[in-house]
Amino acid sequence: MSNSLSKEEAKSKIDKYAADILRPMQSHGGLELWVMLLALGLIMYVFAYFIQLRDGLGVTAMRDYVSWGVYISNFVFFVAVSLVGMLISAVLGLLKQDWIKPITRVAEVVALGFVMVAGLVIVNDMGRPDRLMNVFIHGRIQSPIVWDITVITTYVTISLLLFYLPLIPDLAFAKKRLKNMPVWQYHLFNILSLGWIGTPEQYKILHKGIRLLAILIIPVALAIHTVTSWLFAATLRPGWDTTIFGPYFVAGAFVAGAAAVVILMYILRVNYKLKDYFTDFHFDKMGQLLVLVSLVYLYFNLNEFLVPAYKMKDADAVHLHTLFSGKYAVLFWGVQIFGMIIPIIMMLFRRFRKPAWLAGIAVFVLIGAWLKRVIIVIPTLLHPHLPIQNVPEAFHQYFPTWIEVFVTLGSFVMALGIITALLKIFPVIPIWELAEEEGLTEEFESYE
């Protein structure tokens, strides 16, 4: 028991943790409307994908030249957001940054939601998804696609374990606390808690397991987005022919993931009244983290364009002119200014790192992160080494069809659905870690 708290005060503190943190599992909080919206989005996705599956990829705007469109932009974005689990749970956790404890589960939920859908996003881009098994059966180690599938599968596995292990004490606790939970949920918690009784030996094993997974996930997470960048950089095209894409993609992933976590923190703070756990201090720290990774990302953006702009090779010159002053100029400068430069400047000031302000800034950063992936993919494909000629006018440009819009919407719906389900079924904040930090482990485990 904490030296500064009496037995009654300690029990009262655990009661407060339980009441506040388990509330999202019991409260609907407008969930019915949210689930209806997700269901509507999923129906639209199924309808659009059925047409695409029946009629082929010809129903999209992808053609011989722009063979990758918003589907691959989505894939890169989803993989990027998923890296936030590694950044917060592993990197900051290993650095003993105790302020992240209430945030770690939120980060892991975001990581799981996006990385589990990332693989399905690739299937959206396949004209013959029935041949997907050929990648596993006949895949060659020389293919970056095989590397991508390998690291994604490994990352999903480790992320699941990193999400699950810290849940075990909370599942045993929630099983005792929530008297009116559905029978299926009680049995689920009973199975997943693995007979947890909170002995010192169990805590020792738990800490070792979490630390091991935190160490393992770092190289895997770096590999997953580095390999994704190699899918581009290994192709001889202006705009992709660069050696910085590995760290560039990783830096951009940290920006997108941190922004997604800030947004979810704010939603949970407001909707479930968790101001005592997602405090102004935590938002300030997340704002500082977002500034740091954004500055690193800005540095790589300068590298991406400054070097080819200085040399101005013929193919690179055409590509850069299209971005800087051509038909993609509005989108390009909009992303740079409103998705990066202005947010960085604002977040340097503490008043803009308050919850509401920071959440608003994070929305712009996240939208900019997705549009940035569109800029990386599509303008480059419109600049092949040989001129586009003797083909229909539609081949000279790309704009997604309604089929692609609905399928893209469905991808986000599935990720948000996974996040919603995880936050509804399991405690949103690791209660045992808060109790351990306060020296209340004994009261936490003896709670009835």
Image (spheres, rainbow, N blue to C red):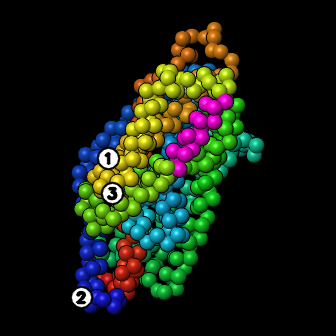
The residue at which mark 2 appears reads as: 8
For the residue marked with disc 2, what is the amino acid?
Glu
Pick the residue in front: 24 or 289.
289
Pick the residue in front: 110 or 413.
110
Element under disc 1: helix
Instruction: Determine whether 327 is above or below 273 in the image.
Output: above
Q: CA distance from mark 2 to mark 1?
A: 41 Å
Pick the residue in front: 408 or 448.
408
Q: Residue placed farthest to the top in the image?
A: 390
The residue at which mark 1 appears reads as: 360
Instruction: Determine whether 441 is above or below 38 in the image.
Output: below
Q: Is residue 447 left or right of residue 294?
A: left
Whether tag 1 and tag 3 are in contact, CB under 8 A, the answer is no
Q: CA distance from mark 2 to mark 3?
A: 38 Å
Please give the name of the residue rendered at 39% of the width and 79% of the height, measured from the top-left corner: 437
Please give the name of the residue rendered at 27% of the width and 84% of the height, measured from the top-left corner: 11
Between marks 2 and 1 in the image, the one whose residue lies nearer the viewer? 1
For the residue marked with disc 3, what is the amino acid?
Arg
Between marks 1 and 3 in the image, the one whose residue lies nearer the viewer? 3
Q: CA distance from mark 1 to mark 3?
A: 14 Å
Element under disc 3: helix
- Mark sitting earlier along the chain (1/3): 3
x, y percent for residue 170: 39, 73
On residue 313, which mark appears? none
x, y percent for residue 103: 40, 63
- Mark sitting earlier along the chain (2/3): 2
The residue at which mark 3 appears reads as: 350
Query: Is residue 50 within the magenta segment?
Result: no
Which image quadrant is residue 142 in?
Answer: top right
Q: Dominant secondary structure of the magenta stretch? A: helix
Instruction: Provide the residue span drawn in magenta.
Output: 296-311
Is residue 367 something one can see in this rendering? no
